[in-house]
Amino acid sequence: QVQLVESGGGLVQAGGSLRLSCAASGGTFSRYVMGWFRQAPGKEREFVATIDWSDDATHYADSVKGRFAISRDNAKNTVFLQLNSLKSEDTAVYYCAAGGVFPGTWAGQYTYWGQGTQVTVSS
């Protein structure tokens, strides 16, 4: 059983940056594909980014490509999401997920989920 805890969310002005972290425990973190998803009020959960466990290959949603960056530190059992050039439409609860097969862009492909962290971008 893997537990995931996100942190780093907050309120930021448009054009600003945030760095989200997701700390994992209870499993072999280095073996999991990790992903970030987000869900805005009244909308479905959507894929943001994912990183492979073996070669750190990454894949992004078109809406965040070039602005967001996913990375992982297997020694610290942590995955990160750097959010740059934030826009109001990036406002959402951001969720970390573990499991699945790379590139996992569908939420159903992931087994474990964190509780989410709120990101609010003011315009």
Image (spheres, grey):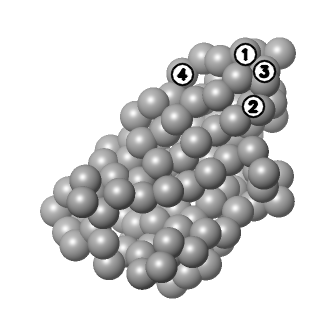
**Residue on which the image places disc 1:** 13
Q: CA distance from mark 1 to mark 3?
A: 4 Å
* SS for dot 2: loop
Q: Earlier in the sequence, mark 4 or mark 2?
A: 4
Q: Is residue 30 left or right of residue 40?
A: left
For this rendering, which residue is in front, 67 or 115? 67
Task: Name the spot of residue 5 as percent of width and height, x first.
Answer: 32, 44
The image quadrant of residue 48 is bottom right
> How far apart are labels 2 and 1 at the CA level?
8 Å
* Image mark for residue 14: 3
| Amino acid type at image mark 2 | Leu
How far is the residue under mark 4 from the one under mark 3? Answer: 12 Å
Q: Residue at x 50, y 56 (%)?
A: 71
Observer able to see residue 109: no
Amino acid type of disc 4?
A: Gly
Q: Nearer the viewer, residue 11 or 17?
A: 17
Discs 3, 2 touching: Cβ within 8 Å: yes
Q: Are marks 4 and 2 in contact (CB under 8 Å)?
A: no
